[in-house]
Amino acid sequence: MVISARRLTGLLAVLTISSVALVACQSDGDINDESPPRPTATAAQGDSGASPVLTPTSNPVPDSGSELAPSPSPTLAPSQPQPLTSAPQEPPDLDQSIASIDLNDIVFDTFDGSSRRLPEADQALIKRLRNAIRPVYSPRYEDASGGDWLDPGDLVLGYVSGSGQAYAYPIKFLNFHELVNDVIDGVPLLVTYCPLCASGVVFDRRVDGEVLTFGNTSALYNSDLVMFDHSSGSYWFQTGGEAVVGTRTGTRLDPLPSSVMTWDQWLALYPETNVLSLEQGLGTPPSRYFRDPFSTYADLINEDGNNFPFPVDVDLVSDSLRLAEIVVAVAIRDHERAYPPTRIGNTAVNDLIDGEPVVVFSRGTRQVATVFSPVVEGRQLEFEYVDGMFRDLETNSTWNLGGVATSGQLEGTRLTPLPSRRAFWFSISISNPNIEVYGQ
């Protein structure tokens, strides 16, 4: 794998192997106050460049016996998202005297084919790079038809609000923006995605009673996105949701229930979903999002080993799994367990974490896993996956991938979703060295 340039606008990070070229994450910002032509992805051989169109109304809705049977419509009317009404304040200078990691492990992409470690970066450079990969601060949504540009197999990071309204954040969009700050049903949340570690996590933005707003440093820690909060300027490791440099060092964000699955899976479960609009007022041509330049990235890392475009200390990574193997991690108090869908396969995993029951609905063929509490009205259910459907042994009700009973005695019942993180193993392992792997 050959790295010929870096990941942001004006530069192509081209990862070449077996004649496949991969464009890495690109900035949507203009860091030099110029307007350079936007590069386009180099297609794999045989790729016509055409993107099949998924029309939501053309997809048959599975019947009630399917694991993808749609979830019942919420009985409560969801509140409208409450975006920021003004631009967030400029953060104070980073206090580098407080840190939980070696400052040299924070590496800036300078967008000119080189990089700069944090101790070598002056304030002018730090400010110039800030939000070069533009976050979304005032998100706009459309109904499900707004996702008709997505292919059925495209991934989305999905979130369901307290009122039952679903929101889909296409990974093809998040590849280029990485952060979405929002308030949904009164919950200030941060939708995060790092394409270099396939890390999709939704966090609660509240810390000690304060609602934080997050931006992008354009730096990485072990090849993972480094965020900053506007009130303190502290730097946060995205996968862990933990401040690692600055006055908030040691503070953690609470993850919220979310899941990464294919667009057709999400749409079948939530036909009335909202989807993040391609038009966010950032001046980005929508066609820019039509390709996923990271579609073969995991294979490149797994085949070549420690050959990342940015530094990764593999000594910090447990060898329990392959570096870029997808896992879904679930934490109960101080105990966390990782579930690799590909190894688990198509199944229901009934498990205990720190004495608390957990059920994982896994679809290994698509590297998808959803996580729930199996306790319903004080009764703990046990699940199985038979004939392409999830069933509980107590009532023989069938359940969909979204944790909703679609037939049987418990029809309409919803399992309580549990917070989880989905990412490549190397990033999850670095964020929590004590994490266990299911089955090991």
Image (cartoon, grey):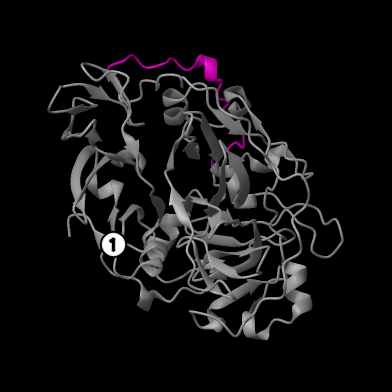
Residue at the limit of the structure toward the left, as seen here: 394
Q: Is residue 117 above or below residue 259?
A: below
Q: Is residue 40 magenta?
A: no
Q: Nearer the viewer, residue 390 or 196?
A: 390
Asked if residue 83 can be seen in this view, the reply is yes
Residue drawn 45% across the image and 30% down it: 266
Query: Residue 397: horizontal and vertical position, in percent?
Result: 20, 21
Q: Is residue 50 magenta?
A: yes
Query: Residue 375: horizontal and vertical position, in percent?
Result: 23, 36
Quarter of the image for residue 396 reads: top left
Q: Is residue 422 left or right of residue 101?
A: left
- Per the rendered image, the range of residues in magenta is 46-65
Name the residue that disc number 1 marks.
Answer: 321
Q: Is residue 60 above or below residue 42?
A: above
Q: Residues within 10 Å of mark 1 (few under 14, many from 20)?
A: some
Q: Is residue 178 left or right of residue 138?
A: left
Q: Nearer the viewer, residue 382 or 232?
A: 232
Residue drawn 48% across the image and 38% down it: 158
Quarter of the image for residue 379 reads: top left
Q: Amino acid at mark 1?
A: Leu
Query: Residue 67: horizontal and vertical position, in percent?
Result: 30, 25
Q: Nearer the viewer, residue 296 or 153?
A: 153
Q: Secondary structure at mark 1?
A: loop
